Image (cartoon, grey):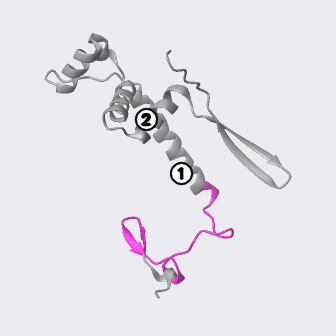
Amino acid sequence: MEDSTNVPQKKNGGYKKLNGEDGKHFSKDYQPSNAVKQAGWDRKKFTRQVLKEMLDMKYKFSAKSPIKKSLVAAYGEQVLDMTVGQLMGLQQMEKAIKKSDSIAFTAMINQALGMPKQETEITERKIVVTRKKDIELNEGS
């Protein structure tokens, strides 16, 4: 059986062993500096800001876009004023319905109605975690 510490780990497009002189595992004593952590947090914040701005941009359809034609046929001319985020939501909805994709369905419902709240109840030595559903579906309505 091969020693798992000598198995190459993919890092930055190449392989380096994570033992000895080739690299170190992060541990309690070996952590990145605060400056390096802050730089990572700043990159993450910037990326999130750029993505939010992109999702809020109006989508410009090309004149011959088959997607434009099918959306206008299904929803009317108001789709021409939709944002990138709204169009992505429609795509997610289509995937959930046409392909019976449960992950797409869950993402769509969570986006529209919010994540179910989670409660943690600690009694004596038991921990019980339950998810509350915010929605009650009534048949016939």
From the top left corner, tell me how far across and down residue 14 is, in percent: 37, 70
Residue 31 among magenta residues = yes
- Residue 111 is left or right of residue 134, and the answer is left
Camera-nearest residue between 93 and 83:
93
Q: Secondary structure at mark 2?
A: helix
Residue at numbered disc 2 = 105
Q: Amino acid at mark 2?
A: Phe
- Residue 138 is left or right of residue 63, and the answer is right
- Residue 54 is left or right of residue 34, and the answer is left
From the top left corner, tell me how far across and down residue 132 is, in percent: 65, 34
Residue at 68 percent of width and 68 percent of height: 28
Between discs 2 and 1, the one toward the N terminus: 1
Mark 1 and mark 2 in contact (Cβ < 8 Å)?
Answer: no
Residue at 45 percent of width and 32 percent of height: 108
Quadrant in which residue 79 is drawn: top left
Judged from this view, the residue extending furthest toward the top is: 77
Query: Crowding at label 1, few (<14), some or many (≥20) Cα neighbours within 10 Å?
Result: few
Residue at 36 percent of width and 38 percent of height: 100
Residue at numbered disc 1 = 40
Q: Which residues are magenta?
A: 9-35
From the top left corner, tell me how far across and down residue 12 is, in percent: 40, 64
Q: Amino acid at mark 1?
A: Gly
